[in-house]
Structure formats: structure tokens, C-alpha cells
Image (spheres, rainbow, N blue to C red):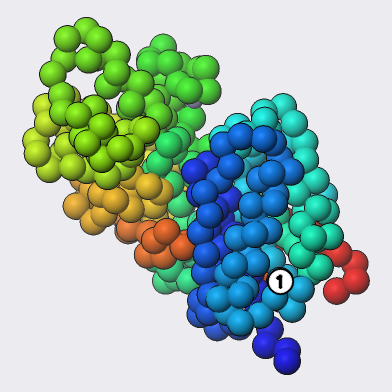
Amino acid sequence: MARNLRGGIDLGGTKIEAVVVDSGNTVLGSARRPTPTEGGPPDVARAVADAITDAATAAETTPGQLIGVGIGSPGTIERTGAVTNALNLPAWAGETYPLRATLKRWLRTEVFVGNDVQVATEGEFHLGAGRRYNSLLGVFWGTGVGGGIVLDGKSWLGRGGSGEIGHMVVKLGGRRCPCGRRGCMEAYAGRAALERRARRRVKKGAKTDLFKLMAKHHHPRLTSSIWFAALKKGDKLAVELIDEAVEALGAGIASAVNLLDVEAVVIGGGLGVRFGAPMVERITKAMHPHLFKDDTPPAVVSAALGDAGGALGAALMALPRHPSSMQVVRSTRR
Ligand SMILES: [Zn+2]
């Protein structure tokens, strides 16, 4: 039975989301697996294969019957569909692994690999909050701050390294970024940087419930829900650090808008989705003083596809005729 079903996978640092969709992008089956924290790239690839197999089973099919599977992956995506230097995945730093070729063999279907943030931006552009616009900046505020760009309806990938909005410099000689440079937006706004900052402040005697909440909820990290809960309680340190994060996001996003003049900015990611519309409003306000054309600001909207956005966007890569010029690796047999 040919149902023209496609698979989409969002390969994240903590979890793997998989969906199987029909030709109208309706989710027929989905599955979620934790990302392996030990082992190496082959173990991650195995977990990805298991996740899409689960989603296919839920949709009453098998991976081999899908017309293709798209994967949004961290790291640098080579033209061959190999993935290099995926820092959030185990033993993948400095390594190149043939993710596409391996999964193609295991799943017995066509496989496409794209950058996770760009794929999620594509998802919002075609199916979510960006549908009404022709140009879009996706800002994914989570562990780091990632960006995706769609201009004139087409993905802008640069030479493969575009969209690194987290590393826009918002303060010369400023705070050290997880990337090792100074003054990046991510150094003030990324979840990892925020946690590092909070720990340092506690060592210097600052009072906060952040780490008590973390222990109470048995989380190994200050997750977006912990930050959300602390803000709700008016925790002083949390409020101060998130205020600073919002200022940095405002400056960084506005600078990108000054350069690109996109019609809309979509805010997603773990923190972005968790904080939702009220935070989008705050970011919009924080952007304003930095906008050069402040009489025509872009629309700033919350990502609409939620947790499944990355997987839905990834599934777009497996469309027989992909709607944009996104760089995808296709076999010549199609
Ligand atoms: Zn940086």
C-alpha cells in the first residue's frame, strides 16, 4: 500500500523525537527516545533508527515503506550526509560519522540530513508560525542560542555555517561564551551559560532557590522548567539573570534584523517555548531600542509547532520535491 508517508527525526542532545507524517504533514505516529550519553556515534545512530522504527510502528508501517526519512542533526552537516563535530552527542567531538549512509542501509529507505536549527526554522516557515511570511529569522533559545534564516522563501545556509545568531557580539570584551570567545549573545542568554553563571554567583554567596528546585524535581541541570518555576516565585537571582538574557537577546536579534530586514522572527527552543508569549513580548520590547528602522519592526512570534517542530521540519526534507532550496543530499535514483 503506497501511502506516501515520510519520517522526520529531531536528534537533540537529550532526546530523539521521531514522527511519521502523511502527505498533508499530519502526524500518524510519533516516538521519543533518550539520546545515549555513552558510547559513540554508532550508538546514537542505533537509537535514531529505533526511534523512527517506533514511530513507524505507531503509524502501522515500517521504515522501509516510508518514501524517505529526514534528520535534523547538530554539528556540521557534510554534503554526503555525514555529521562532523556534534558537540552535544557522545564521542562526536572532532569526529565525522556517515549518519546518512548508515541509516540508509539500516532503514532501507532514502535518508536526508540537515542542520537541526535550520530544519526547525523550515518547519515553522512551511507549517508553523512563519507561514504568512516570505522571510524569517528563527531563534531557538535553549542550551545555546541557534538561528535559522529563510530569505525570499529559501533557506540561507551561507557556506554551511550561517545562522549562528548566538554568537552575535552584544558586548565587546564581555562575558566568556561556551564557544570560548567573549561577549556573544549566548554567553548571556544560553541555558548552559545561565547555569554556569548561577553556580558562580551562589559560590560568591548569592541566595537562590534555583538549585533547590533542581534537586526537588530530580533534574541534573537547571532545565527550562526550573527557570520558569523560579521566575514565577520571583527568585531574585533567576529574575536578574533572565533580565540580562532578555536584554542580550533583544540586542542580538535586533542587530540581525538590522542586517536582514526579515518580515518575522520566530522564537522557539526549550526556554523560548517554555516562557511562551509573555517572553516574546519582553524580547520584542528589548529589541526596540536597537532597531535602526524602528517604525517598521518585524513581527515577533512564538514557535507554533512546539516540541515536534524539529521532527516535522526534518520530514520536509523527504518530500519528493522539497519546497525550498535547502541543501539536501539526494540519491540519483529518485
Ligand atoms: Zn560564542
- Give the structural element (helix, strand or loop) at label 1: helix
Is the shortest distance between ligand 1 and the CB of mark 1 under 8 Å? no
- Using the rendered image of the protein, determine whether residue 26 is visible from the camera's viewpoint: yes
Viewer-nearest residue: 28 or 243:
28
Seen in the picture, residue 174 relative to 156 is either above or below; the reply is above
Seen in the picture, residue 290 relative to 2 is either above or below; the reply is above
Q: Residue furthest top?
A: 204
In the image, 125: left or right of 97? left
Q: Mark 1: give few (<14), some (14-19) or many (20+) Cα within 10 Å.
A: many
Residue in view at x 46 percent, y 52 percent: 137
Viewer-nearest residue: 247 or 211:
211
Q: Which residue is mark 1?
A: 63
Q: Position of residue 9 (x, y in %)?
A: 60, 59
Residue in view at x 68 percent, y 58 percent: 49
The amino acid at mark 1 is: Pro
Seen in the picture, residue 334 relative to 161 is either above or below; the reply is below
In the image, 296: left or right of 121? left
